[in-house]
Image (tube, rainbow, N blue to C red):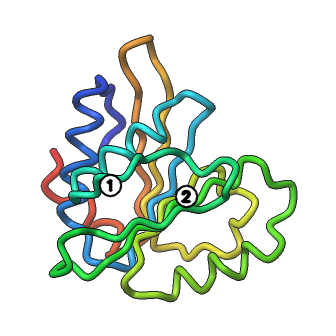
Amino acid sequence: MKPHNYTESELISLASKIAKTLKGGEIIELIGDVGAGKTTFTRALIQSLGVKDEIQSPTYTISNRYQLPDTSKNIEIVHYDFYRLTEPGIIQNELAETIQNGRAVVILEWSDIVENTLPSDRLTVEITPTSELTRMLTFKVGGQNSRRLLEGTT
């Protein structure tokens, strides 16, 4: 998928489309500066799966877990934000266990600190503000699982 400028409503729509393809075991890495739209993307993805909880970036708690109300999907969303960490410490072990859990969909922000823990098969979404109202999204797929997430989004 080529880089493309998205309005906020288009970004939300894209995240919702990706959410519909989730089966468990996927990793979505979000890259962008503070205020780029990582939390907007994450909130839209999680809420489109029926989660009614308040969705915030776990900047201070490091991770948030969300159970879906639709148990037929049998997945959980685990959202990590490593912004405040200077060393991964024990959270790197938790992340490695979560990645091995085939039910978990892992969403990562500020993941450079745990780069060596991440598998190559992940969807990387780089979000760059291009104006007050638009964001340029650039996608990198690392394998079949991550490629599947973008099918049908264009």
Q: Nearer the viewer, residue 14 or 138?
A: 14
Relative height, residue 91 to residue 154 (above, below) = below
Q: Nearer the viewer, residue 50 or 104?
A: 50
Determine which residue is flagged by label 1.
46
Report, in whole angstroms, how far the alpha carbon at label 1 lies from the one at label 2.
Answer: 13 Å
Q: Residue at x 30, y 66 (%)?
A: 147
The nearer-to-camera label among 1 and 2 is 1
Q: Is residue 38 left or right of residue 58?
A: left
Q: Quadrant of the C terminus?
A: top left
Q: Position of residue 7 (x, y in %)?
A: 29, 23
Q: Residues within 10 Å of mark 2 (few under 14, many from 20)?
A: many
- Secondary element under disc 2, as helix, strand or loop, is strand
Q: Position of residue 54 (x, y in %)?
A: 40, 46
The type of residue carrying mark 1 is Ile
Which dot marks residue 87? none
Number of marks drawn: 2
Q: Decide which of tag 1 and tag 2 comes sooner along the chain.
A: 1
Q: Residues within 10 Å of mark 1 (few under 14, many from 20)?
A: many
Relative height, residue 22 to residue 110 (above, below) = below
Q: Is residue 119 left or right of residue 89?
A: left
Q: Residue at x 26, y 37 (%)?
A: 12
Q: Residue at x 51, y 49 (%)?
A: 30
Q: Position of residue 153 (x, y in %)?
A: 17, 49
Q: Badges 1 and 2: C-beta atoms under 8 Å apart?
A: no
Determine which residue is flagged by label 2.
108
**Residue most toward the front?**
53
The answer to which quarter of the image holds residue 136 is top left
- Secondary element under disc 1, as helix, strand or loop, is helix
Q: Residue at x 26, y 82 (%)?
A: 74
The type of residue carrying mark 2 is Leu
Q: Nearer the viewer, residue 26 or 150?
A: 26
